[in-house]
Image (cartoon, grey):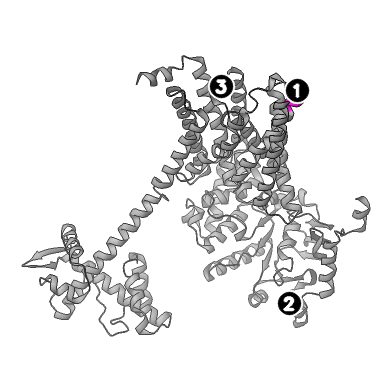
């Protein structure tokens, strides 16, 4: 088994030239439950979108299990933020869960009977089997989140990247989900979770990645969950860094010099 | 009746071309319209329809004739270009999508009109009829057109079947589709091309202005009748085919009637009818539901008065006169009488002397309402810490609403208490 699930090397991501992540450099261990912590606008969601290749990288690279993302796509599963989709969309809970199987059957091949079994099993693990045929428009917030997690489970990946799975869910769902994530890491899966609640962070996770545009700290909870680190993470942005970022946007200045010469 | 049979026999080749042509183009538009609807890009169809016009003119200028291939190529080019321009503007400026659409739509359409005027003034005899792209010329569909429409319909239908899964996934959750490694940009290009194709074909029959309606209306109607994408696609296609057929029929029966606009009228009528009569979310079913609720509330309020009178007098099955009832709660005499006989019909009340009394069933229902009222008052004071003198009105509303499951849960959570916050006894049903 690999010891490093995810290597982020010198990663910078910019939106219309303004860097929102700046030289992030981290190695995340396999088989652990890892929390990404930081204030609003710290770039937490952007970080996992960059890892999944959903937003373009301005510089740096990401390696998953020592390989390029495209070589290991099937072993990685992404859970977007619940609010990122329209829950009035005309599909059922089962339809959404089966999307997790598309990673394996592709765009055109028919879903096999086994795919339905796996999707149903994922729903059962999330306590959603009774809702399989329910329209997603009729779900509560917690049930929507469970459906998203069931879809990820149906993907049968080794690395899971989850964007705020605890946002706006009921206490029962939060408890059920954290128990499940624990079980998954015990089976050797790596689970990376964007989390906003500082109080439960230390108790839920094995490792933490503290982020506020730049990387503050990354490591086992006992080592990095310190008052100094939290002060750095939440104690406001670095004013100079923000000013420089804004200037880059204003001047339409690229993240790397080479890109300027190319243009 | 004979007219219908004559029409249905399609013996007149002209009728055949128009009818089949209208149906084919409506079928294709309905399929692609469903995806624009699911992607919440309904206005894109309007932008493409307007942006097609300069392409039509350019095609004519380059070829010097109304060669359908040149015209289609030009139309396709500017139509697709407009979509990418809208995307580009949204991504690279502060202009939001609706503004970008309006901007692109009017600029392209303006350019189209300029070119059209230029061609018309150029003295080229071949140009006559080019302005039909503005208003459509469904009644003039000929054999060649029919071939083109048929091929387009086959292309669009088979592409929809082939790409259905990924189209749906992208409409629902594009980031997730990207995370699975699917070629989202390429698929988007295919989808946009198909939509442009449907518009380019449709515009020749119904014109620039009505094209957006042709694209969206069948899907909008279908959304009211199905909760699955497959169902919506199917119903939208049927609505489309039918309105194409009906439009052709109307203009056959009354030759003064234009085919294209009638297609849109039929489709719109079907959409409005769906909006009103759809069983799950139609206005009629919502109205009926509201009316049922109003009746339930009024019924139960009256039964409650019987129970309250009985509680005061300790006799449950005495007859109550109108005067006694109005003494306890304000009623309009006319509507009170109507409601009394309604409840009598339903078996909750029966006549007794010159008044009414509760039947067994009536007592059970009245008692349940009073119980829920008092339990809810207790729930509000214990769990939500609301002062006892503030809970009555809330309970008056909730008492009619709770399902038996919630009622049980309420009893369980409160532990079957004996009295409410005002020390009134909570009546449980004795088995």
Q: Main secondary structure of the magenta part?
A: helix
Disc 1/disc 3 C-alpha distance (Å): 22 Å
Give the left or right position of residue B373, taking residue B123 as reference.
left
Quarter of the figure with the N terminus of chain B: top left
- On the question of residue B181 being in view, the answer is no
Disc marking residue B140: 3
Disc 2/disc 1 C-alpha distance (Å): 66 Å
Q: A253 above or below B53?
A: below
Residue shown at 70% from the left, 38% from the top: B80
**Which span is picked out in magenta?**
B59-63
The residue carrying mark 2 is A234
In front of the other: label 2 or label 1? 1
The secondary element bearing badge 3 is classed as: helix
Disc marking residue B63: 1
Q: B379 above or below A60?
A: below
Residue shown at 66% from the left, 74% from the top: A201
């Amino acid at each position: 088994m690999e010891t490093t699930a995810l290597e982020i090397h010198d990663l910078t991501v910019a939106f219309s030239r303004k860097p929102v992540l700046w030289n992030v450099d981290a190695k995340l261990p396999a088989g652990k439950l890892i929390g990404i912590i930081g204030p609003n606008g710290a770039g937490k969601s952007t970080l996992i979108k960059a890892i999944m290749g959903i937003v373009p990288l301005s510089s740096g690279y990401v390696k998953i299990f020592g390989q390029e993302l495209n070589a290991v796509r099937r072993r990685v599963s992404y859970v977007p933020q619940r609010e990122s989709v329209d829950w009035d969309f005309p599909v059922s809970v089962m339809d959404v869960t089966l999307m997790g199987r598309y990673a394996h059957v592709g765009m055109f091949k028919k879903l096999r009977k086994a795919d339905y079994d796996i999707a149903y099993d994922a729903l059962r693990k999330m306590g959603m089997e009774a809702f399989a045929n329910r329209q997603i428009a009729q779900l509560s917030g917690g049930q929507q989140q469970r459906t998203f997690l069931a879809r990820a489970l149906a993907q049968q990946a080794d690395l899971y990247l989850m964007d705020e799975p605890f946002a706006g869910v009921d206490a029962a769902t939060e408890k059920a989900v954290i128990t499940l994530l624990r079980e998954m890491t015990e089976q050797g899966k790596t689970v990376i979770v964007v989390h906003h609640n500082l109080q439960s962070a230390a108790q839920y996770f094995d490792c933490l990645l503290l982020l506020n545009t730049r990387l503050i700290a990354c490591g086992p909870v006992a080592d990095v969950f310190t008052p100094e680190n939290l002060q750095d993470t939440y104690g406001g942005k670095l004013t100079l860094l923000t000013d420089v970022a804004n200037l880059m946007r204003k001047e339409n200045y690229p993240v790397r010099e080479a890109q300027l010469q190319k243009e | 009746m004979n007219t219908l049979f004559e029409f249905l026999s399609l013996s007149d080749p002209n009728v055949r071309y128009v009818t089949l042509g209208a149906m084919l183009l409506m079928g294709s538009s309905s399929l692609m319209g469903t995806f624009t609807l699911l992607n919440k890009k309904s206005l894109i169809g309007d932008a493409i329809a307007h942006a097609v016009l300069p392409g039509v003119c350019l095609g004519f200028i380059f070829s010097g004739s109304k060669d359908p291939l040149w015209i289609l190529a030009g139309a396709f080019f500017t139509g697709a270009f407009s979509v990418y321009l809208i995307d580009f503007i949204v991504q690279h400026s502060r202009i939001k999508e609706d503004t970008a659409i309006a901007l692109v739509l009017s600029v392209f359409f303006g350019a189209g009109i300029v070119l059209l005027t230029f061609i018309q003034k150029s003295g080229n005899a071949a140009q006559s009829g080019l302005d039909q792209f503005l208003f459509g010329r469904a009644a003039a569909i000929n054999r060649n057109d029919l071939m083109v429409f048929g091929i387009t319909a086959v292309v669009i239908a088979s592409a929809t079947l082939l790409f259905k899964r990924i189209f749906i996934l992208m409409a629902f959750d594009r980031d997730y589709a990207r995370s699975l490694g699917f070629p989202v940009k390429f698929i988007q290009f295919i989808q946009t091309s198909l939509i442009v194709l449907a518009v380019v074909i449709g515009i020749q029959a119904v014109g620039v202005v009505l094209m957006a309606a042709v694209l969206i209306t069948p899907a909008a109607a279908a959304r009211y009748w199905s909760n699955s994408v497959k169902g919506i696609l199917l119903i939208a296609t049927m609505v489309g085919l039918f309105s194409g057929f009906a439009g052709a029929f109307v203009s056959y029966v009354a030759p003064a009637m234009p085919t294209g606009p009638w297609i849109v009228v039929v489709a719109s009528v079907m959409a409005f009818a769906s909006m009103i009569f759809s069983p799950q979310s139609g206005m009629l079913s919502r109205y009926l539901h509201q009316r049922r609720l109003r009746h339930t509330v009024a019924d139960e309020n009256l039964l409650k008065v019987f129970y309250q009178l009985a509680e005061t007098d300790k006799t449950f099955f005495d007859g109550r006169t109108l005067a006694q009832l109005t003494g306890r709660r304000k009623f309009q005499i006319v509507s009170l009488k109507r409601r009394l006989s309604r409840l009598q019909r339903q078996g909750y009340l029966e006549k007794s002397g010159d008044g009414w009394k509760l039947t067994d069933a009536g007592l059970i229902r009245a008692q349940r309402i009073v119980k829920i009222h008092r339990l809810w008052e207790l729930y509000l004071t214990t769990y939500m810490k609301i002062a006892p003198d503030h809970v009555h009105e809330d309970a008056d509303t909730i008492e009619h609403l709770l399902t038996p499951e919630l009622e049980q849960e309420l009893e369980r959570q409160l532990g079957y208490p004996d009295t409410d916050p005002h020390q009134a006894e909570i009546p449980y049903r004795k088995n």
